[in-house]
Amino acid sequence: MTAHYLVLASILASTTALAQTTNSKPQPVPFTDTIPAARDIPYPGTITLDVDATDTARAIFNIRQTIPVAQPGPMVLLYPAWLPGNHSPSGPISKVAGLVIKANGQRIAWTRDPVDVFAFHIDVPAGAAQIEVEFQYLSATDRNQGRIQMTPEMLSLQWEKVSLYPAGYYTRNIPVAASVKYPAGWTAASGLPATASGATYRYQATDYETLVDSPTIAGRHFRREALSPRVNLNIVADNAKELAATPDQIAAHKRLVDQAIKLFGAQHYDNYEFLLSISDEMGGIGLEHHRSSENGVGTGYFTKWNDGPGPRNLLPHEYVHSWNGKFRRGADLWTPDYRTPMRDSLLWVYEGQTQFWGYILQARSGIVSKQDTLDMLAIIAAYHDNLPARSWRDLIDTTNDPIIARRQPKAWVSYQRSEDYYNEGLMVWMEVDSILRKQTGGKASLDDFARAFFGVNDGDWGQLTYTFDDVVKTLNAVAPYDWASFLTARLTEHAKGAPLNGFTDNGYRLVYAEEPTPAFKDREKSRKAVDLSYSLGMVVGNDGDISSVLWDSPAFKAQLDVGARLVSVNGRAFTGEGLKEAITAARDGTHPVELIVRSGDRFQTVSIDYRGGLRYPRLEKIGNGENGMDRLLAPRK
């Protein structure tokens, strides 16, 4: 009895002590957003923006801006955060340095917003008619800092990186006049017209939205080719020999323009400038704009044309964006300024159908052959057909990936997924094409949708937004079908395997062979790797470093991981060919693939009992005669 009493007393005492103890419980500091929301009203005055881009040795852009002000008092200047074509808040604010703001010759203090670090608060003094802004944009000097934009031979200038703009206004209502001083002897090109006076280019006065959509390239080695009366190909390169495009190569680019105009039936620009940089020093890029596109590739674009298709899908893709993404744009993606968050839910149209037409137009124009195009499509189909991540993450969720991942590397991309709205989106649109053909007895195809959806308002280079319902309505006008249910299913399903119906119903099936296609070999060469995704389930660099492991593959089950290095294969030093030979030898079931693998300072022996041999994807024609895919890839008359 006494023991029970003592225990009960102890419990009561502890409970009382706990009840009397009060932990600190803070409350959040209130926050009031003092940054003016964008309004659809004119900005009072024209901003001047002067950029000195001559410091190519240190890759520094020096910027001076004069910004008119209407009244004294609080004002907010913004650095663009949500960048068009990036689909995410990726403005490189960390590269802005040396910011000084003055009025009437006197320095004004600025304060960075504590929540929105892209915003700078100032107090405009009485009597000031304008403010002067100076800063430097310290572009990358090494690849680990981001894309290199300036070398001793060329540069890529993107206006959003070298300017601030006043908060409180739609960017289309902010007038701006810009100029750039380039290194002596260089030539520059942009979708925005300019007048050159020596090394200084003065650009046509425009609005800030159009300026941001009109980047420039400039270089010592420059070539311009007219592809049509309204379209030019502007090329800068590391050296003069990289400019040596043949007449046949230029003719293929002319056919690209011709085939695109025949497809869409309209042009949404007054002039269009391909901005192509060919360089092993400046970083590559593929970025769409309404009246231009930025296209950055490695050396050999023209000089190694016959080695394989290489990156020649880039220009067709970015050109299509003038219609799809710039003129027609998802309603939830369009924003009035570069502070308002973008919503990416319709990127399966914006990028997915652009990816589709990029491949189709490369074949129709002959920039890439029909067979290479089929082989490239096989690579896309095989990747997604072997993607375990489809079991848990649907296609529509990948439209959030630019915001979630910011295009950073992933260890297990086959299980995490990436921006699959590009290529799986392509397959969805391939299936739409096959359904249109079936529903109309071959009288209609996705060409008819493209003309109806993107080909309206010839000459209009504003933005015409759309919703999911608008897509469905246009499809139904081409051929009645339950398009809403079909598209919803494809966007939200967790089916095993990729949606391959568009290929099979258009006359080609996905198969695997022991020998890679020329396009697959070209891809391996450009990646400097051996791609064994469909056998061992991994990609290995020519140096033995594992760059990719497919989830649940034989390599995965052997506990191999990205970053490990293959040291030896079956007792011999690693080579790509040696690894392929070991996979072939293992088919008889008596010789597993024996690897020595190094991870950091640890070595281990790994045995992979895989007997399936080498497997490479290709598209195999079903039956004889011309089919839907053949007609899809054929040039338009």
Image: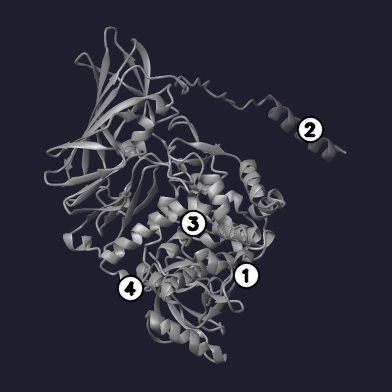
Q: Earlier in the sequence, mark 3 or mark 1?
A: 3
Q: In the image, what residue type sits under mark 2?
A: Ala
Q: Quadrant of residue 52?
A: top left
Q: In the image, what residue type sits under mark 1?
A: Thr
Label 4 crowd (10 A; few <14 / some 14-19 / many >=20)? few
Q: Earlier in the sequence, mark 2 or mark 4?
A: 2
Q: CA distance from mark 3 to mark 1?
A: 19 Å
Which structural element holds mark 4? helix
Name the one closer to the observer, 593 or 186.
186
Nearest-to-viewer mark from 1 and 2: 1
Q: Which residue is mark 1?
A: 504
Q: Which residue is mark 3?
A: 357
Label 1 crowd (10 A; few <14 / some 14-19 / many >=20)? some
Which structural element holds mark 1? helix
Q: Which residue is mark 2?
A: 9
Which residue lies at the image location 25% right of the left edge and 65% below the top edge?
A: 246
- Quick check: marks 2 and 4 in contact, CB under 8 Å? no
- Quick check: marks 4 and 1 in contact, CB under 8 Å? no
Any part of residue 536 in sight: no
Position of residue 64 relative to residue 420, above or below, is: above
Q: In the image, what residue type sits under mark 4?
A: Asp
Q: Earlier in the sequence, mark 4 or mark 1?
A: 4
Which residue lies at the image location 47% right of the left edge and 82% below the top edge?
A: 515
Q: Earlier in the sequence, mark 1 or mark 2?
A: 2
Q: Which residue is mark 4?
A: 307
Nearest-to-viewer mark from 4 and 1: 1
Nearest-to-viewer mark from 3 and 4: 3
Q: Position of residue 136 (x, y in %)?
A: 24, 35
Which structural element holds mark 3? helix
Res 196 label: none
Q: CA distance from mark 1 to mark 2?
A: 79 Å
